[in-house]
Image (cartoon, rainbow, N blue to C red):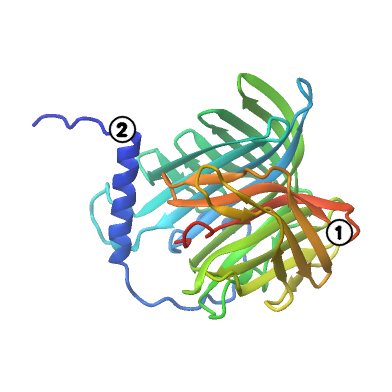
């Protein structure tokens, strides 16, 4: 039998995404509300393969030493997706779990966003997500935990991240002790925790230069069976490390007309106890917009966000922080380094703004 010709990467991605869509169509079955549970660490830093969707997500800002005194924003995300329709298949080649990854680097002085993406089925030493602790790998990209430290190595096509993160605070359980509602129905929920104020060090390689960097980061880990209400097309979300050591989260699920299907978030003062926000306590109001020259999608890049603590302005550090991930997760979204300002205009924090579902309905 002749050996099949090797497929190029775009062809492999199309076939893999096609098999995922076909398998998802076979899944069926009702979805039920997630029960309250006590999250246990380090076990719950690891993967939960019985759940449909999961991600580990780190964003942050970095300042470089010489050369150049550059500043950067970065995002790295590993996704795990359970394919229900293949779980009973006997073949080792069945795509029971898929692993995706995104990486992005915002060069603030250069005014440019660099990004890359990966996708593979779990197994064969190519992709994996450990269950006992955070240990995610996709080819030569990895994210691992060791006690209160994490390490991420992502040598991308046009840039590279080699970063270490150290916990400076206790874990922040989002929602109701880690059970976070995402819609009007109880089944629209996730298990969700954050690790704000991560002390970050390492190196960034860009355009032939290696920069030694330090800064702050934010980690989210979330897993669920269903996140989106049928009327939701996407979400707007902020995760902000406050300059005084506090942490602010706010989000809303959005319908096609721009209305809020659901909203929530939390605030934890430095050294204090967290407070969760109800769906009627958070409001996002769009301000200045930017239209992508690549996709012609328009995004608000300035927001007014009302919370029980007060009203804040969120402003993108760079307008063009759009990520085209159609070769992995199939979506286009805006994810970018942003500044948090209080009512008087004084900066009180910095973090990331994420906006999904503006070009087309987000599918998870």
Which numbered marker is on residue 8?
2
The image quarter containing residue 202 is top right
Of residues 299 and 283, the one nearer the viewer is: 299
Q: Looking at the figure, which quarter contains the N terminus?
A: top left
Q: Secondary structure at mark 2?
A: loop
Camera-side mark, 2 or 1: 1
Which numbered marker is on residue 191?
none
Q: Residue at x 52, y 47 (%)?
A: 78
Q: Residue at x 59, y 39 (%)?
A: 104
Which numbered marker is on residue 342?
1
Of residues 278 and 31, the one nearer the viewer is: 278
State left or right for residue 349 relative to residue 322.
right
Label 2 – label 1 distance at C-alpha: 50 Å
User: Is 275 above or below relative to 118?
Assistant: below
Q: Position of residue 109 (x, y in %)?
A: 73, 31
User: Is 220 above or below relative to 116?
Assistant: below
State left or right for residue 87 relative to residue 168.
left
Q: Looking at the figure, which quarter contains the C terminus?
A: bottom left
Q: For label 1, count other residues whose C-alpha is less than 10 Å away and answer few (under 14), some (14-19) or many (20+).
A: some
Q: For label 2, count other residues whose C-alpha is less than 10 Å away and answer few (under 14), some (14-19) or many (20+).
A: few
State left or right for residue 269 relative to residue 14.
right
């Amino acid at each position: 039998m002749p050996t099949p010709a090797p497929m190029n990467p775009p062809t492999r991605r199309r076939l893999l995404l096609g098999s995922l869509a076909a398998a998802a169509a076979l899944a069926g079955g009702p979805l039920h509300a997630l029960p309250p549970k006590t999250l246990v660490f380090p076990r719950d830093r690891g993967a939960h393969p019985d759940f449909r969707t999961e991600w580990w997500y780190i964003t942050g800002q970095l300042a470089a030493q010489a050369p150049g005194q550059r500043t950067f924003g970065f995002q790295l995300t590993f996704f795990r997706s359970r394919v229900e329709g293949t779980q009973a298949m006997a073949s080792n080649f069945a795509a029971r779990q898929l692993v995706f990854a995104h990486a992005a680097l915002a060069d603030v002085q250069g005014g440019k966003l660099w990004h890359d993406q990966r996708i593979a089925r779990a197994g064969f030493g190519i992709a994996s997500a450990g269950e006992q602790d955070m240990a995610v790998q996709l080819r030569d990209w990895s994210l691992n935990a060791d006690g209160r430290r994490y390490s991420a190595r992502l040598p991308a096509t046009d840039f590279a991240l080699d970063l270490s993160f150290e916990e400076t605070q206790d874990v922040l359980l989002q929602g109701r002790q880690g059970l976070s509602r995402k819609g009007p129905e109880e089944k629209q929920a996730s298990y969700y925790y954050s690790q704000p104020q991560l002390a970050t060090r390492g190196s960034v390689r860009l355009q032939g230069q290696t920069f030694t960097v330090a800064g702050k980061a934010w980690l989210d880990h979330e897993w669920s069976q269903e996140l989106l209400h049928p009327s939701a097309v996407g979400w707007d979300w902020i995760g902000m490390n406050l300059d005084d050591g506090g942490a602010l989260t706010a989000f809303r699920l959005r319908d096609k007309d721009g209305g809020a299907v659901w909203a929530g978030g939390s605030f934890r003062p430095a050294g204090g106890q967290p407070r969760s926000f109800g769906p009627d306590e958070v409001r996002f109001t769009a301000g200045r917009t930017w239209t992508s020259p690549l996709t012609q999608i328009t995004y608000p890049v300035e927001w007014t966000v009302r919370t029980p603590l007060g009203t804040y302005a969120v402003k993108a550090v760079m307008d063009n922080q759009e990520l085209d991930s159609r070769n992995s997760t199939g979506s286009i979204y805006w994810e970018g380094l942003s500044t948090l300002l209080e009512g008087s205009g004084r900066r009180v924090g910095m973090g990331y703004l994420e906006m999904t579902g503006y070009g087309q309905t987000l599918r998870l």
